């Protein structure tokens, strides 16, 4: 069921890593998880125009380290770092611990699945037809090195009364291959007709090359299997077919029949 499951969760600990990296006991786990959700929602609203692809949260020793991956790092930092200082103060209020913020630049935003989904959502809100937005995004991704891309839009497309789902695909998108590097993104467009959901899968190639495959180890002499014993007489031959013995039919004699008649 590789086409049903979330591609990132399907590949965790194989080719993907967690977006929140920390350990907590059973008492504080729920509160820390809610803090992470609040941080991501706050960054999504605050940095709506900064093209943020993903946010990684780490908690080393009563501190917090937040890494923001953005295609426009200058918008996040601001003039002389003013915006990032305000952002750091807001995050410290939410988390209650000292926060260190790092900004990482996304070199190719046209190949990032989350940024592609956000871009299509913005175009749909500006009343651009969904087919035009989807095909343009697919062409840009394939031109900049993606080996395959699939985009799906669901909702009242073009203002139709009945909601439907349409998708386009170009290249290979092997969703069931664990070693495949598949980037997944989801976004929602708030239009006058309702909400339209956009899902994007981008295939960037295989993570494990042929040189990285585990080598085949030959068995030691002690681990070799002993030879099989020679076959005994009669082994391997088909068993003789047994036939059920038939009972002899009863024979009636003329004398016996005459006596019975008398």
Image (cartoon, rainbow, N blue to C red):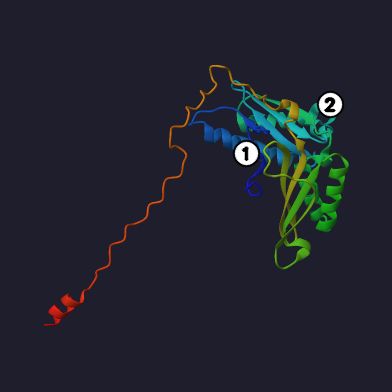
**Residue beneath the point at 65% across and 37% down:** 11
Q: Quadrant of the C terminus?
A: bottom left
In this rendered view, identify the residue nearer to me: 74 or 144.
Answer: 144
Left or right: where 193 falls relative to 259: right
Residue 37 disc label: 1
In this rendered view, identify the residue nearer to me: 167 or 53.
Answer: 167
Cα separation, mark 2 vs mark 1, equals 29 Å
Q: Residues within 10 Å of mark 2 (few under 14, many from 20)?
A: few
For marks 2 and 1, give the one nearer the viewer. 1
Q: Within the image, what quadrant is residue 156 found in?
A: bottom right
Q: Find residue 236 and report its horizontal and vertical position in percent.
A: 47, 39
**Residue beneath the point at 16% across and 75% down:** 256
The kind of secondary structure element at disc 1 is helix
The kind of secondary structure element at disc 2 is helix
Seen from this angle, which residue lies furthest bottom?
262
Is the C-beta separation of discs 2 and 1 under 8 Å?
no
Give the residue number, with chain letter if any, for mark 2: 80
Q: Find residue 125 and report its horizontal and vertical position in percent.
A: 79, 55
Q: Within the image, what quadrant is residue 43 found in?
A: top right
Identify the mark nearer the N-term, 2 or 1: 1
Q: Residues within 10 Å of mark 1 (few under 14, many from 20)?
A: few
**Residue beneath the point at 88% across and 43% down:** 143
Q: Find residue 221 and report its horizontal and vertical position in percent.
A: 56, 17
In this rendered view, identify the residue nearer to me: 252 or 239.
Answer: 252
Seen from this angle, which residue lies furthest left?
262
Compared with residue 216, is residue 18 higher up or lower down, i.e. above or below?
below
Q: Is residue 180 visible?
A: yes
Residue 185 disc label: none
**Residue beneath the point at 72% across and 41% down:** 44
């Amino acid at each position: 069921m590789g086409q049903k499951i979330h591609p990132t969760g399907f590949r965790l600990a194989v080719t993907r890593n967690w977006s929140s990296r920390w350990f907590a006991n059973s008492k504080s786990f729920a509160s820390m998880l809610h803090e992470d959700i609040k941080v991501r929602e706050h960054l999504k609203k605050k940095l709506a125009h900064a093209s943020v692809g993903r946010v990684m949260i780490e908690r080393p020793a009563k501190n917090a380290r937040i890494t923001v991956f953005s295609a426009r790092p200058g918008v996040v930092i601001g003039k002389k770092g003013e915006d990032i200082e305000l952002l750091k103060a807001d995050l410290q209020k939410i988390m209650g611990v000292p926060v260190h913020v790092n900004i990482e630049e996304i070199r190719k935003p046209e190949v990032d699945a989350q940024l592609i989904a956000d871009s299509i959502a913005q175009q749909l809100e500006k009343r651009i037809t969904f087919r035009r937005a989807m095909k343009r995004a697919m062409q840009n991704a394939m031109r900049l090195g993606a080996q395959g891309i699939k985009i799906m839009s669901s909702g009242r497309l073009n203002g139709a009364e009945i909601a439907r789902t349409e998708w386009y695909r170009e290249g290979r998108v092997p969703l069931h291959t664990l070693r495949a590097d598949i980037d997944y993104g989801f976004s929602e467009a708030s239009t006058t007709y309702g909400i339209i959901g956009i899902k994007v899968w981008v295939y960037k190639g295989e993570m494990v090359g042929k040189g990285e495959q585990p080598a085949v180890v030959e068995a030691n002499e002690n681990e070799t299997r002993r030879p099989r014993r020679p076959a005994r007489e009669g082994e391997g031959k088909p068993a003789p077919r047994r036939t059920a013995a038939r009972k002899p039919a009863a024979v009636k004699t003329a004398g016996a029949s005459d006596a019975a008649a008398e």
